Amino acid sequence: MSSRRSQPLLAGLLTAAAVAATACPAAAQTKPAAPAQTPAAPNAPAAAAISPSHLALAKEVMLNSGISRSFDSIIPVFGDQIKQAAVTRPDLTKDLDDVLLKLGPEMELQKQRMIETASRIYAQRLSEAELRDIAAFFRSPSGKRYVETQPLVLDEMVQAMQTWTQEVSEYIMVRVRAEMGKRGHQMQ
């Protein structure tokens, strides 16, 4: 979802996260809570049984699938939000730009942390054999083409879903009004 049309959705999610963090600064400064435990998938390996090769395959799949592209756009959005919050203080612009640039390597480490987390999630949900098959697909010409077209496909799907949602909403309302009319009820 790295294209411009998908970014408003991502920006909205990030804004909600930023608002939550600023609403409770103490919580924002503490280490995040452990993720909720969800039931393992039927063939998912136990967390303790993840070997280094299994984790490496999971990371390869996560990176080659294009999912990590979404992480690339998150940090700049936070920087932009900070700049936007400081717009009433133009005297801060130069220093703020310098600070954000200086924090670049630290932010890259934060992105790498998320990549490691996502890789572990893949390894917990998919066996090493499954990941090997998936990695082979993403190494193939078809897999590479799939990843290449994914942002465009997602953009088109979002647009199609918006149109479809509007059409279905209107269709259902017309049908409900018609059926309620048959029962003697008028709906506006």
Image (cartoon, rainbow, N blue to C red):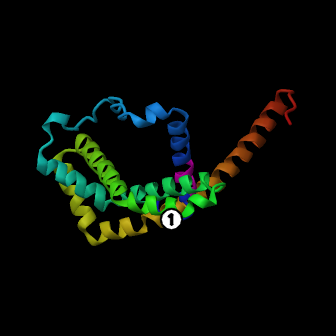
State which quadrant residue 31 falls in. Answer: top left
Q: Residues within 10 Å of mark 1 (few under 14, many from 20)?
A: some
Compared with 142, 125 (above or below) is above
Q: What is the magenta segment's predominant secondary structure? A: helix
Q: Position of residue 179 (x, y in %)?
A: 78, 34
Taking the image as shown, residue 34 lies to the left or right of residue 55, namely right
Could you tell me which residue is drawn at 50 percent across and 38 percent down?
A: 21
Residue kind at label 1, given as amino acid type: Ser
Q: Position of residue 137 (x, y in %)?
A: 25, 62
Taking the image as shown, residue 170 lies to the left or right of residue 56, namely right
| Secondary structure of residue under mark 1 | loop
Q: Position of residue 89 (x, y in %)?
A: 63, 55
Could you tell me which residue is drawn at 74 percent across and 46 percent down?
A: 170
Could you tell me which residue is drawn at 49 percent across and 66 percent down?
A: 152
- Can residue 39 be seen at all in this image of the molecule? yes
Q: Nearer the viewer, residue 26 or 164?
A: 26
Looking at the image, the residue that sits furthest to the front is: 91
Q: Nearer the viewer, residue 24 or 181?
A: 24
State which quadrant residue 23 falls in. Answer: top right
Q: Assess whether residue 9 is covered by the magenta stretch.
A: yes
- Quarter of the picture containing the C terminus is top right
Task: Read off the residue under disc 1.
Answer: 3
Which span of residues is magenta-colored?
8-12
- Can residue 73 be seen at all in this image of the molecule? no
